[in-house]
Each structure stands twice: as C-alpha cells, then as structure tokens.
Image (spheres, rainbow, N blue to C red):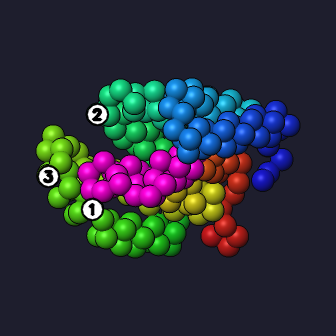
Amino acid sequence: MSPDVTFTAVLVLVLASLLAIADWVAVARERLPLDRLLKPAVICALIVVVWSFDDVDGALRALFSVALALSLARDVLAPRWFAGAVAASLLAHGVYVGGFQRMGWSWLWAAAGIVVVLFAAGAYAVRLVTGARETAPAYTGMVPVYVGVVSVMVVAAAATGRPSAVAGAFLFYVSDTLVAWNRFRAPTPYAPVLIAGAYHLAQILLVLSLSTGPAPGL
C-alpha cells in the first residue's frame, strides 16, 4: 500500500469486502434475489474506492472506473441476457488492458504472463469450443474470441509487474473459465461460490493495483 490510500478508501474497501462475503453466502444458499443485489453493490463500492485514492493518474482512474462500470453491467445482465453480459465483460477486459498499459510495461513479466496463458488456454480452450459447438452453437465463435481477450488482459496485467494486478487478472481468468466450463462442458462442484469468490477477489485486487507499485527490482 502507498500513502495515497485514504481513510475513506479503506472504509469503503472494507464495505466492499463485507458485501462480497455476504454475496458468497447468498450464492452458497441459492438466494438468487439477494445475489442479484449484492453482486452489483460490490462493484459500486469498488468504483467509490477508485475515486477515493489520492494521487492516481486521472486517465488511469477513469479507465478503471469504466472497466468497473462495464463489470457492473455484466453483473446486472448476466441473469437475464448472457450474450449481453459476455459483451460487457469483453469490453471491461479491453478497458483494463488500456489501464494496465498506462501503469508501465516489463517484457520479463509479460513473457511470464504469455507462458501462463498459453499453457492455460491450451489446457481448456479447445474443450470449451467443442463444448459450445455441442451445447450452444451460437457461442462457438465467441468462445475463442473471449479466451483471446482475457488472455491479453492477463498478459497486460503481468507486464505491469504489480503483484496485485497479476493476482487479480489471474483470478479473473479462473472465474471466467469456470463460468464457461459450467455452461458449455459440465457443472463443477461448488462452482457458483468459486466463481463469485474468484470474481470479487479479482476486482478487489485490480483496484488495489492502483495504489501499489511494481515488484522490487522490476
């Protein structure tokens, strides 16, 4: 953490964390109406956190706010319009990429990110495309596009050299992979809770990357 983390930011971050935990409980107990209220509330709180930090580059603050707003749209649309939620999520990842590029670029960290996403994509992307072709043909073309965009987001986050950005992007990758796997392949035990947990932790860590510098020596 750096001195630009204000008392207000800490308070709202704690609130966002409590809302996230409450949402995980709601998901575990299958309280869907409550989940539909809590999930967007977490993102709204994180937008406030972004604007509560001091001395953050104005363009960077704006980009992260837009990415979170698109994530909010994703959360609102997901229960009723999956295709719209996917489109909002794609745009959010793209905006995050723009934000990460403003943070700086380390080719060493970028290379590490490329290795990770190539391994991960090779392990599941083909299976997801096959699953989509069999269960939801309309999404067959969207799956590789989404895998490509989220992979670029992970590489861009890795290139910043900021541990919180790297961890957040990786958790986003895990969350989105579980969503796709459960929809196009086969249900995974405890998947809804795992998806919600990874998603919220990812967003929290990405927001925190605004107030942390790169790893020492990079």
Q: Residues within 10 Å of mark 3 (few under 14, many from 20)?
A: few
Amino acid under label 2?
A: Ala
Q: Earlier in the sequence, mark 3 or mark 1?
A: 1
Q: In percent of the image, x 44 and y 58: which residue is there? A: 189
Give the distance between the C-alpha atoms of the residues marked 3 and 1, in whole angstroms.
Answer: 14 Å
Q: Which residue in the structure is indicated by mark 1? A: 125
Q: Which residue in the structure is indicated by mark 3? A: 134
**Disc 3 vs disc 1: which is toward the camera?**
3
Left or right, 194 with respect to 79, comes to right
Q: Is label 3 in a helix, a strand or a loop?
A: helix
Locate residue 144, reporting x and y percent: 24, 53
Q: Is label 1 in a helix, a strand or a loop?
A: helix
Amino acid under label 3?
A: Glu
Q: In percent of the image, x 32 and y 28: which residue is there? A: 81
Left or right, 153 with respect to 204, comes to left
Amino acid under label 1?
A: Ala
Left or right, 104 with respect to 213, comes to left
- The stretch of residues the image draws in magenta is 174-200
Q: Which residue in the structure is indicated by mark 2? A: 83
Q: In percent of the image, x 70 and y 54: which residue is there? A: 212
> For residue 85, which quarter of the picture?
top left
Q: Earlier in the sequence, mark 1 or mark 2?
A: 2
